Each structure stands twice: as structure tokens, then as C-alpha cells.
Image (tube, grey):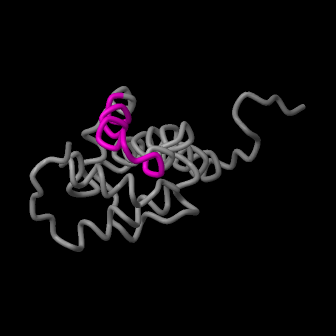
């Protein structure tokens, strides 16, 4: 059951679709999240708990119970990618104290949590090139 549509600016929809592409989540799933008013901007991604993803998937499945093609769109991989997308945005916020701007989101930097990138950069700036926990003699 789809919610009453709200007017989301086109630039925000485009930004969310860009995030879906980077996270390798179907645009159809992102369209559902927007239509259900779960997301309106990229900053809203931090408002969804990783624990909520299963319930969101169940609601999606109920909405499209009579549409097998749409049901196949949300696979277990989609669930994992959705959770990772949330984790990435939360990691970015913890690392930088703000949500990312669209120019900071691309497939390449989406592959690693921002906290991990920051920790690697910090180790490099301190001259440490060996991974943490490995003893060099």
C-alpha cells in the first residue's frame, strides 16, 4: 500500500538515485523508499536503523505481493546492500560530523567505510604503513 505522494524536489530524487546506483541498489527499490516517504533526501538515510531494513523489506513484499517481478527486485543481496548503505552514511557522519554532499558519493569511495579510510589516512600521516595488529621485526 503506497502512501500519499509528497512533493520531493527533483534534485533530491536524483541524488537518492545516484546513491542507489553507487550502493548497487535497484532504482525501483529506491523509488519505493521515496514513495513510502522513508527517504526524501540523502540525509534521511541516517534516520533509518539497520534493524529496520527487514521490516521495510516485508512492507515492500506486502505492497508487491501480486507482482513477482518486483518481488525479485529485492533479494537478500539488496537487503545487505541497503544495510551497508545505512552503515556507510552513519560512518560518514561520525567521521565528518555531517552528511555527505552528492559530489562526495561515488562507487569508488562507497566501497570503504569513511571511518576506515580516515583511520588509514591517520596511520599513513603518522608514518605507519603496516596494518594495525601486525608486528614487524
Residue at 58% across, 63% down? 108
Which of the pair 81/72 is nearer the observer?
Answer: 72
**Is the residue 11 above or below the residue 53 in the image?**
below
Q: Is residue 93 left or right of residue 40?
A: right
- Magenta span has 118? no
Q: Residue furthest right?
A: 137
- Kindly indicate the quadrant of the structure image that contains residue 30: bottom left
Q: Residue 47 at what x, y percent from top left? A: 24, 39
Q: Residue at x 40, y 47 (%)?
A: 67
Image-based side of 125 in relation to 128, left or right: left
The quarter of the rendered structure image containing the N terminus is: top left
52 vs 110: above or below:
above
Which residue is at the far front?
66
Residue 76: x %, y % from top left? 54, 36
Q: Is residue 56 magenta?
A: yes
Q: Is residue 21 left or right of residue 61?
A: right
The range drawn in magenta is 55-70
Q: Quadrant of the C terminus?
A: top right
Using the rendered view, name the quadrant where residue 13 is placed: bottom left
Give the vertical position of 7 relative to 115 (above or below).
Answer: below
Does 49 appear above or below 15?
above
Q: How many marks?
A: 0
Residue 10 point in image, percent of width and height: 21, 73
**Horizontal and vertical percent position of residue 116:** 55, 43
Name which residue lies at 57% across and 49% down: 112
Is residue 35 toward the left or the right of residue 103 in the image? left
**Looking at this view, is 102 or 50 the one in front?**
50
Main SS, magenta residues: helix
Residue at (56% x, 41% y) in the render: 77
Amino acid at each position: 500500500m503506497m502512501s500519499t505522494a509528497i512533493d520531493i524536489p527533483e534534485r533530491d530524487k536524483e541524488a537518492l538515485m545516484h546513491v542507489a546506483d553507487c550502493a548497487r541498489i535497484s532504482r525501483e527499490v529506491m523509488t519505493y523508499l521515496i514513495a513510502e516517504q522513508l527517504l526524501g533526501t540523502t540525509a534521511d538515510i541516517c534516520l533509518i536503523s539497520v534493524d529496520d531494513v527487514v521490516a521495510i523489506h516485508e512492507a515492500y513484499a506486502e505492497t508487491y505481493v501480486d507482482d513477482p517481478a518486483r518481488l525479485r527486485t529485492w533479494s537478500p543481496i539488496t537487503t545487505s546492500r541497503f544495510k551497508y548503505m545505512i552503515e556507510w552514511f552513519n560512518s560518514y557522519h561520525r567521521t565528518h560530523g555531517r552528511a555527505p554532499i552528492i559530489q562526495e558519493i561515488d562507487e569508488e569511495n562507497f566501497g570503504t567505510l569513511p571511518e576506515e579510510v580516515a583511520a588509514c589516512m591517520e596511520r599513513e600521516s603518522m608514518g605507519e604503513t603496516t596494518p594495525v595488529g601486525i608486528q614487524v621485526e
